[in-house]
Each structure stands twice: as C-alpha cells, then as structure tokens.
Amino acid sequence: MSTNNTPLSYKGRPLIRKDNTIYYGSMSDKYIAVLQILSAKKVGDLDVAESVSVQLQLTDPDISPKDKVIKSSTKNGLYNAMDIASIWLERSLSSK
C-alpha cells in the first residue's frame, strides 16, 4: 500500500486542523480563514460539528491578534462554516 502525502485541501486551498481549530488558506497569502468548532454532537460513533466560529484574519505577524480579525460569524455545521469561509477568502484575496 502506498502512502499519500497530499495535503488536505478545499476548493484548491490548504486545510490544516489542530484539535478543534481548522486553518483554511495559505499563510503566504494576505488572509486566512480560521474555523473553531464550538460544539459537537454524537452521530453514531462520530462527533459532528454543530456550532462553528468563522473568522477572516490577516496573516501579517506584526499585527496584534485582536486587530487581525477582519470578519467574524458563527454558523450551524461545518459545511455552512466552510462555505462562508471560502466566500470571504475568495473575495478578500481577489480584491488585492
């Protein structure tokens, strides 16, 4: 069996997960979306995200964490959160 080292991505942008936080986009871009799973429910033996916080943030390391947040919202379900994160990221990066 071969190992696949292809990174996880969504709509052509990388996804990185650390515990209950998902980073969507590339740190080399001006913006990145940060999704934090606030609550989850059990469906069978899986945990499924119920409430997800979405933030569009600047990636500039010289800006304070408070000033990095451009937009913020809370969505029901991971699909809705990824959808709005994708829209925000696409619009922000295309308006350079």
Image: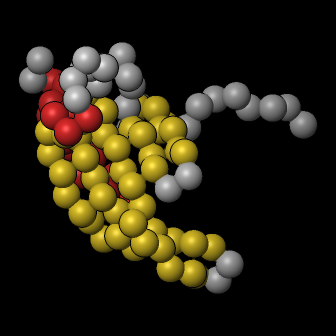
Residue 25 position, x and y percent, is 37, 31
Here the colouring is secondary structure
Which quadrant: the N terminus?
A: top right
| 19 shown above or below 6 | below
| 67 shown above or below 22 | above
On the image, which quarter does residue 7 sit in?
A: top right
Residue at the spot 45% in from the left edge and 68% down from the top edge: 49
Which quadrant: the C terminus?
A: top left
Residue at the spot 63% in from the left edge and 73% down from the top edge: 46
Residue at the spot 30% in from the left edge and 71% down from the top edge: 76
- Of residue 95 and residue 47, the one placed in the foreground of this image is 47
Q: Is residue 69 left or right of residue 13?
A: left
- Whether residue 89 is visible here, answered yes or no, is no
- Of residue 33 and residue 7, the one placed in the foreground of this image is 33
On the image, which quarter does residue 70 sit in?
A: top left
Residue 71 position, x and y percent, is 15, 45
Q: Which residue in the rendered view is the most extreme toward the left?
A: 95
Total number of numbered discs in the rendering: 0
Residue at the spot 57% in from the left edge and 81% down from the top edge: 42
- Whether residue 76 is visible here, answered yes or no, is yes
Residue 31 position, x and y percent, is 25, 28
Residue 91 position, x and y percent, is 14, 34
Q: Is residue 91 left or right of residue 6?
A: left
| 24 shown above or below 59 | below
